[in-house]
Amino acid sequence: DVKVTQSSRYLVKRTGEKVFLECVQDMDHENMFWYRQDPGLGLRLIYFSYDVKMKEKGDIPEGYSVSREKKERFSLILESASTNQTSMYLCASSSSGGRSTDTQYFGPGTRLTVL
Amino acid sequence: DQQVKQNSPSLSVQEGRISILNCDYTNSMFDYFLWYKKYPAEGPTFLISISSIKDKNEDGRFTVFLNKSAKHLSLHIVPSQPGDSAVYFCAAMGGSNYKLTFGKGTLLTVNP
């Protein structure tokens, strides 16, 4: 079974703090993704990565950056947290072996509150 | 521009009956569609998928139907169980990338 883990389930930070969210997958997947989920807005893609040291902007990258130094690990960084970044953050991974293997598998999520 | 639309924010059905969740898409490049189920405070879990070369895919109580001409897909759950109560997201993928575009979700409540 694919396992995607996220470093924290719940996190409370103050406005202006630098926040690191980490994600690790154990299936040797090439692709990794960061989403945020907000009520009524569904899942929105922040950043994704096709390979180590590769990154591409998703639909809402403003205020975020990412790092992928190792294949299994993908970090989301909030350089200066703001209250509008309070959300559920979800990490996902997938392989690149063709459509039947493109299914993304999600971690349990991190509920981030910025005060 | 919402490329994947789930027009029903919520749906309530009785245990044992059929649940039908609908999804419409606008992008003709989409060629792979997935349904995810999400409980509160958990990550989405993959349920079932369908390629655009098919019009139906079945897995136990879950069946997904795809109507390409109408750009419409639906998820049928038969029989519905209280444990099926969750938010269901429709997602689509297309072209040469691996990005998923998600709908906003439908909250399904199955009443005992």
Image: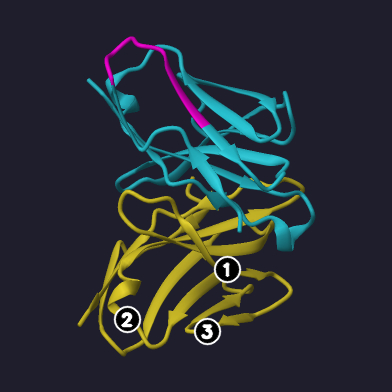
Chain colours: A cyan, B yellow
Is B112 left, or right, of B16 in this rendering?
left
Q: Where is residue A4 drawn, in percent x and y?
A: 55, 45
- Residue A66 found in image quarter: top right
Residue type at the position of mark 3 = Gly
Q: Earlier in the sequence, mark 1 or mark 3?
A: 3
Closer-to-camera residue (B24/B48): B48
Residue stretch rendered in magenta on the structure: A13-22
Residue type at the position of mark 1 = Lys
- Residue B97 found in image quarter: top right
Q: Secondary structure at mark 1?
A: loop
Tag 2 near tag 3, CB within 8 Å: no
Dot 1 corresponds to which residue?
A: B71
Tag 1 near tag 2, CB within 8 Å: no
Label 2 Cα crowd, 10 Å radius (few <14 / some 14-19 / many 20+): many
Residue type at the position of mark 2 = Gln
Does A87 appear above or below A81? below
Dot 2 corresponds to which residue?
A: B81
Q: Secondary structure at mark 3?
A: loop
Q: Where is residue A28 drawn, in percent x and y?
A: 72, 44
